[in-house]
Image (tube, grey):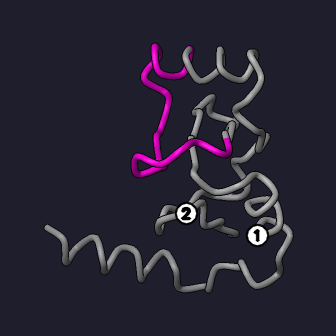
């Protein structure tokens, strides 16, 4: 299981990512708009400028304030491997939030 930090502590499962693209072109802007209309758009920019659009295999569109190149480098970086006990740690954190 590999996870990628997409900025501001937000993480995405690397196995689910299909594409990481820049939001500048008209077709990508249409994909973002379509995702918003279908309630499949996740804005992880914290109010900052969108610099990368992540498309997942579940048709979710994720907006990030981190450059696409940075996210791609994190994707190939071997240090991004999740520890074996990550799921247990996340469950413990979630239990404490209740």
State the residue in front, 11 or 51. Answer: 51
Up-down relation of residue 23 to residue 26 (above or below)? below
Kindly indicate the quadrant of the structure image that contains residue 53. top right
Coordinates of residue 34 in the picture (x, y in percent): 56, 14
Callout 2 crowding tier (Cα within 10 Å): few <14, some 14–19, many ≥20: some
Coordinates of residue 81 in the picture (x, y in percent): 72, 79
The residues bearing labels 2 and 1 have C-alpha atoms spaced at a distance of 11 Å
Q: Which residue is mark 1?
A: 74
Which residue is the extreme one toward the right?
A: 76
Q: Within the magenta stretch, is there residue 74?
A: no
Task: Identify the element where label 2 is drawn.
Answer: strand
Kindly indicate the quadrant of the structure image that contains residue 61. top right
Residues in magenta? 34-52
Coordinates of residue 89 in the picture (x, y in percent): 41, 82
Up-down relation of residue 6 to residue 76 (above or below)? above
Task: Identify the element where label 1 is drawn.
Answer: helix
- Quadrant location of the N terminus? bottom right
Which residue shows up at 28% across the image and 70% down it? 94
State the residue in front, 11 or 29. Answer: 29
Coordinates of residue 22 in the picture (x, y in percent): 75, 38
State the residue in front, 28 or 62. Answer: 28
- Quadrant location of the C terminus? bottom left
Q: Is residue 10 left or right of residue 68?
A: left
Which residue shows up at 68% across the image and 45% down it? 52
Which residue shows up at 57% across the image and 40% down it? 62
Q: Which residue is mark 2?
A: 7
Q: Which mark is residue 42?
A: none
How many numbered marks are there?
Answer: 2
Up-down relation of residue 7 to residue 33 (above or below)? below
Q: Within the magenta stretch, is there residue 42?
A: yes
């Amino acid at each position: 299981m590999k996870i990628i930090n997409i900025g501001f502590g937000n993480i995405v499962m690397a196995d689910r990512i299909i594409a990481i693209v820049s939001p500048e072109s008209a077709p990508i802007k249409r994909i973002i708009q379509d995702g918003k209309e279908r309630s499949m758009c996740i804005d992880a920019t914290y109010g900052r400028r969108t610099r990368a659009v992540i498309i997942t295999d579940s048709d979710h569109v994720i907006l990030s304030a981190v450059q696409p190149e940075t996210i791609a480098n994190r994707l190939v970086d071997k240090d991004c491997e999740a520890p074996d006990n990550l799921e247990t740690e996340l469950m413990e954190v979630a239990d404490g939030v209740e």
